[in-house]
Image: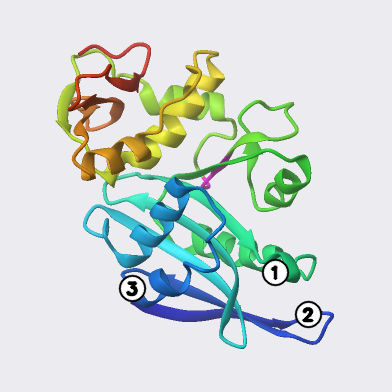
C-alpha cells in the first residue's frame, strides 16, 4: 500500500479533516471501510473492497481518496483505469458520512481527485454518472460536462487537454476504424471494465440505443468469478473493446452488449 496525505483542513465545527490518497493493494483499508459502506448495494460494496484489497491490481490501477477525522473514515472518492494504452477512467463512489455532510469534505475530496487526475495519471478522460444537478455543477468546476450538452445531469465526461471538448466527438474518435474487421473474443477481466461500463454505455445512451435494463459488465465479471458462467470481451484488431457476452452455466439466456457496428 502507498499512502500520501494530500490535504488537511479544519471544518467550521473545529474538526481537523485529513485527506489521504491510498494506492492499493491496501487490505487494511479494505477491511476498515466495511462498516462505513455497510448500507450500499452489493455490487459497489464488492467493487470497493475488492479493488482496495488489490484483487484486480494486475490489470487495473485504482486511486482512493479518504477523508478521516481522528483516524475515522468519514468520506471517500475513487477513480481507476485499466493497465493499457490510452485508458478511460471511471470516477465516482463518492460518499460522506451523514453526520459530516455540509462541512466541505466532498469538495476537498473532489479537489484532490482533480489535481491527481490532471497532473499525474495516464487516462485520456474520466467518466461518471450523477442523478442530481447540484452534484453535476460541483463536478463541472473540475472539467466534467454532460454527454448531452443541454442536460442538467446524467452521464458526465471529463476530457484531458488535447481530447475533444464534447462526448459526441470523443466517442466518434474512440470507435473510428475499430469496427471494420471482425472482433476477437478474449477472456473477460477487469482490464477494460471502464471502457465497457462507461464509454460503451454512454455511447449507446448518446445514440439512443441503450437496452433496458442495461446489463453490468462488472456484475457479470463477479458472476464469472463465482463460477456462474463464462465471460468474453470482444476486442477490435486494434485492441479496443467493442462489447461483451456472459454465458450462464445454468443454460439461461446470455447477456451482454455490443457496439452497434461491431462484427463478431
- The answer to whether residue 224 is seen in the rendering is yes
Pick out the residue farthest to the front. 250
CA gap, disc 1 and disc 2: 8 Å
Label 1 Cα neighbours within 10 Å, binned few <14 / some 14-19 / many ≥20? many
Please tell me whether residue 134 is drawn above or below residue 1 in the rendered image.
above
Read off the magenta span. 157-161
Q: Earlier in the sequence, mark 1 or mark 3?
A: 3
On the image, the x and y values in percent for residue 89 come to 44, 47
Name the mark on residue 105. Answer: 1
Q: Which residue is mark 3?
A: 27
Is 199 left or right of 11, judged from the image as shown?
Answer: left
- Point 19% across, 32% down: residue: 229
Labels 1 and 3 touching (C-beta < 8 A) = no
Is 41 left or right of 137, judged from the image as shown?
Answer: left
Q: Earlier in the sequence, mark 2 or mark 3?
A: 2
Q: Secondary structure at mark 2?
A: loop
Labels 1 and 2 touching (C-beta < 8 A) = yes
On the image, the x and y values in percent for residue 88 come to 41, 43
Q: Secondary structure at mark 1?
A: helix
On the image, the x and y values in percent for residue 7 come to 61, 79
Mark whose residue sits in front, 1 or 3: 3
Q: Which residue is mark 2?
A: 11
- Point 53% across, 62% down: residue: 37
On the image, the x and y values in percent for residue 120 come to 44, 64
State which quadrant residue 110 falls in. bottom right
Is 159 left or right of 234, judged from the image as shown?
Answer: right
Amino acid at each position: 500500500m502507498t499512502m500520501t496525505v494530500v490535504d488537511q483542513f479544519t471544518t467550521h465545527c473545529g474538526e481537523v479533516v485529513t485527506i489521504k490518497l491510498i494506492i492499493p493493494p491496501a487490505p487494511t483499508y479494505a477491511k476498515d471501510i466495511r462498516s462505513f459502506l455497510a448500507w450500499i448495494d452489493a455490487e459497489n460494496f464488492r467493487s470497493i473492497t475488492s479493488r482496495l484489497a488489490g484483487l484486480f491490481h494486475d490489470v487495473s490501477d485504482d486511486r482512493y481518496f479518504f477523508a478521516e477525522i481522528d483516524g475515522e473514515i468519514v468520506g471517500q472518492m475513487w477513480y481507476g483505469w485499466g493497465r493499457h494504452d490510452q485508458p478511460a477512467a471511471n470516477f465516482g463512489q463518492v460518499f460522506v458520512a451523514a453526520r459530516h455532510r455540509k462541512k466541505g469534505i466532498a469538495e476537498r475530496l473532489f479537489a484532490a481527485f482533480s489535481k491527481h487526475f490532471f497532473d499525474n495519471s495516464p487516462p485520456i478522460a474520466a467518466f461518471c454518472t450523477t442523478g442530481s444537478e447540484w452534484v453535476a455543477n460541483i463536478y463541472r468546476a473540475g472539467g466534467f460536462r454532460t454527454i448531452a450538452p443541454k442536460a442538467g445531469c446524467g452521464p458526465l465526461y471529463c476530457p484531458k487537454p488535447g481530447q475533444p471538448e464534447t462526448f459526441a466527438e470523443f466517442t466518434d474518435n474512440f470507435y473510428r476504424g475499430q469496427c471494420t474487421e471482425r472482433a476477437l473474443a478474449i477472456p473477460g477481466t477487469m482490464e477494460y471494465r471502464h471502457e465497457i461500463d462507461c464509454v460503451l454505455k454512454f455511447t449507446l445512451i448518446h445514440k439512443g440505443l441503450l437496452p433496458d435494463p442495461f446489463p453490468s459488465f462488472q456484475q457479470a465479471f463477479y458472476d464469472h468469478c463465482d463460477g456462474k458462467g463464462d465471460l468474453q470481451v470482444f476486442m477490435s484488431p486494434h485492441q479496443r473493446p467493442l462489447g461483451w457476452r456472459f454465458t450462464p452455466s445454468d443454460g439461461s439466456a446470455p447477456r451482454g452488449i455490443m457496439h452497434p457496428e461491431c462484427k463478431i
